[in-house]
Image (cartoon, grey):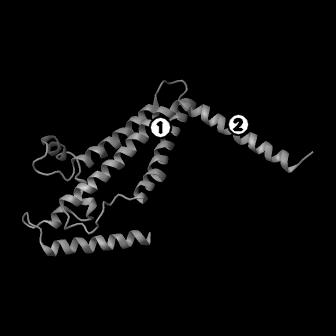
Amino acid sequence: MFSITNFCKGLVLLAGGVAGWIFAEFKPTFPLIIVIIIFIVYDAWTAYVLDKRVHQRYPDKTQRKKAKFTSFAFGKVVKDTIPKRLCLIFLAYLVEHWVFIHVNIPLSYIVTGVICFEQAWSILENESSCRSEDESRFWKQLQKIMVDKTERHFDVTLDELKDSGRVTEERIEQARELLKEYEKQKKKE
């Protein structure tokens, strides 16, 4: 005999069974997931530290009083970046165990390695950006092959802010106007 209570119990049992199967199926990926989450969170932290360095080094060129890193930016990392990377690992694991069953290819480990390399590269870019002249030669050598992310915190190029090594009031005002326009566009989105 059909009743709502039996139907609900059946749904709960079905959901529990599916959740248990998913947990058991993807259990080998949990250490990989922990590793990439640590890398992604550390990358977000180095971006925050870079933003503080940019503000300290160029206080007259940045209008804001606090660092650009906000709970919204961290929320974007948690809501967008981490789930996308987790899906890649899950998909690689499924392909590794369901498609390439006769070939021994550790695809989930390869994908995790690629994600970790991407995050490590970003961490090194953050760490090497906006360093003073007297800091370590290591950071200077690293900047020859990596992107300087300082410009991203102004939304203009550093060359636009400099005039023969000196910053003019006109350039600072242009940068402020561009920053205001960028913030208005972000609010609209």
**Residue 33 disc label:** 1
- Residue for point 46% across, 47% down: 82
Please say if 43 is above or below 72. Answer: above
Give residue 116's quadrant in the image.
top left
Where residue 119 appears, as percent x and y from the top left, is 35, 43
Answer with the quarter of the image where residue 13 lies: top right
Name the spot of residue 37 as percent of width and height, x first.
43, 41
Residue 17 marker: 2
Q: Nearer the viewer, residue 15 or 53?
A: 53
Find residue 139 and name its label: none
- The three-letter code of the residue at mark 2 reads Gly
Please give left or right for residue 57 compared with residue 187 in the image: left
Q: Earlier in the sequence, mark 1 or mark 2?
A: 2
Q: How crowded is the residue under tag 2: few (<14 C-alpha within 10 Å), some, or many (20+)?
A: few
Q: Residue furthest left?
A: 164
Outermost residue on the front side: it is: 65
Rendered location of residue 177, percent (x, y) = 26, 75
- Kind of residue at disc 1: Ile
Q: Residues within 10 Å of mark 1 (few under 14, many from 20)?
A: some
Rendered view: 48 above or below 91: below
In space, the residues marked 1 and 2 are separated at their CA atoms by: 23 Å
Q: Is residue 27 above or below residue 140?
A: above
